[in-house]
Image (spheres, coloured by chain):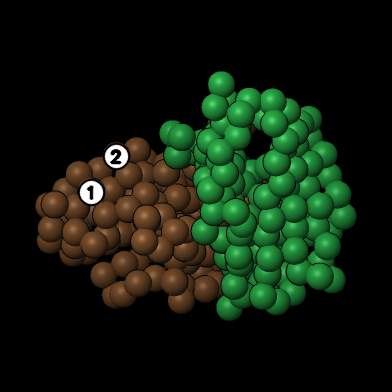
């Protein structure tokens, strides 16, 4: 199966700062998703981004599929952005195939 | 939409007991996934169904684990007998096609 590497593993920010999280894949992935796991454990899908760039408020993501990486940008961070950010890639060509997760980036935003 | 619904939210049981976790996917979604999250192994896929049919159960740790999806709106994950190393958070997720996966709130399982 594919390997998913996320960096950095931990990140501490002051409120208002910007940050970039990175996700590298060992092989081609058909689809890529970013998730945020809040301190209560809930996993929220942020982006479904197999390629290109998407933006949602203060968050944006870019996937360069040919180079097997994706970036998540957080601008003007807030304390509510704290939690663990996971990227995950799907293998296979048919619907509903396997989703392999990285180990996550633990983000702490201090007031 | 109510989102993916899981029950129970918390389960504490003793080693050797049977545990049944339940999931109701989002209406209209045709794929359902069971994941397990632990500190040691992170998030790992256990099994997934497409149109109620199990497609890949290679992540199921051993024969003590079984999963069923009798219809499009219900799935169960059963552990029999349970062991302390099964303690984890179990997530159910659903999606339609290759799209965004939506996760339920998870079931926190503690096996004593």
Q: Is residue A13 visible?
A: yes
Task: Quickly name the residue at label 1.
Answer: B110
Image coords of residue A90 (percent x, y): 66, 66
- Position of residue A64 measured from the top left corner of the image (x, y, whole percent): 83, 62
Up-down: is B68 above or below A54? below
Disc 1 + disc 2, Cβ < 8 Å = yes
In screen coordinates, is B50 left or right of B67? right
Percent across and percent down for residue B86 are 27, 60
CA separation in Å, label 1 and label 2: 8 Å
Q: Nearer the viewer, residue B13 or A11?
A: A11
> Which one of the lettered chains is coloured brown?
B
Q: Residues within 10 Å of mark 2 (few under 14, many from 20)?
A: few
Q: Is A44 above or below relative to A95?
A: above
**At 58% from the left edge and 78% from the top edge, which residue is drawn?**
A1
Residue A53 in the image: state x and y as whole percent. Answer: 86, 49
The single residue placed furthest to the top in the displayed view is: A111
Between discs 1 and 2, the one toward the N terminus? 2
**Is residue B68 visible from the viewing direction of this image?**
no
- Chain of the residue displaying label 1: B
Q: Is residue A98 above or below residue A38?
A: below
Q: Is residue B93 left or right of residue A27?
A: left
Which secondary structure lies at badge 1?
A: strand
Picture disc at residue B10: 2
Identify the element where label 2 is drawn: strand
State the residue in front, B109 or A102.
A102
Which chain letter matches label 2?
Answer: B
Task: Residue A93: name its quadrant.
Answer: bottom right
Q: The chain coloured green carries which letter?
A: A
């Amino acid at each position: 199966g594919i390997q998913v590497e996320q960096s950095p593993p931990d990140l501490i920010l002051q409120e208002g700062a910007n940050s970039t999280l990175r996700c590298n894949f060992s092989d081609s992935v058909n689809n890529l998703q970013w998730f945020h796991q809040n301190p209560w454990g809930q996993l929220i899908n942020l982006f479904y981004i197999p390629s290109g760039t998407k933006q949602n408020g203060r968050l944006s993501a870019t996937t360069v599929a040919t180079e097997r990486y994706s970036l998540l940008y957080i601008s003007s961070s807030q304390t509510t952005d704290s939690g663990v950010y996971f990227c995950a890639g799907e293998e296979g060509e048919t619907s509903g195939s396997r989703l392999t997760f990285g180990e996550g980036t633990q983000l702490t935003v201090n007031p | 939409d109510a989102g993916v619904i899981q029950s129970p939210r918390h389960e504490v049981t003793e080693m050797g007991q049977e545990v049944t976790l339940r999931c109701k996917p989002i209406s209209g979604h045709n794929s359902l996934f069971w994941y397990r999250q632990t500190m040691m192994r992170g998030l790992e896929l256990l099994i997934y169904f497409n149109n109620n049919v199990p497609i890949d159960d290679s992540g199921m740790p051993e024969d003590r684990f079984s999963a069923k999806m009798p219809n499009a709106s219900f799935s169960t994950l059963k552990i029999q007998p349970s062991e302390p190393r099964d303690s984890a958070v179990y997530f159910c997720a659903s999606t339609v096609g290759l799209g965004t996966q939506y996760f339920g709130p998870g079931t926190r399982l503690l096996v004593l």
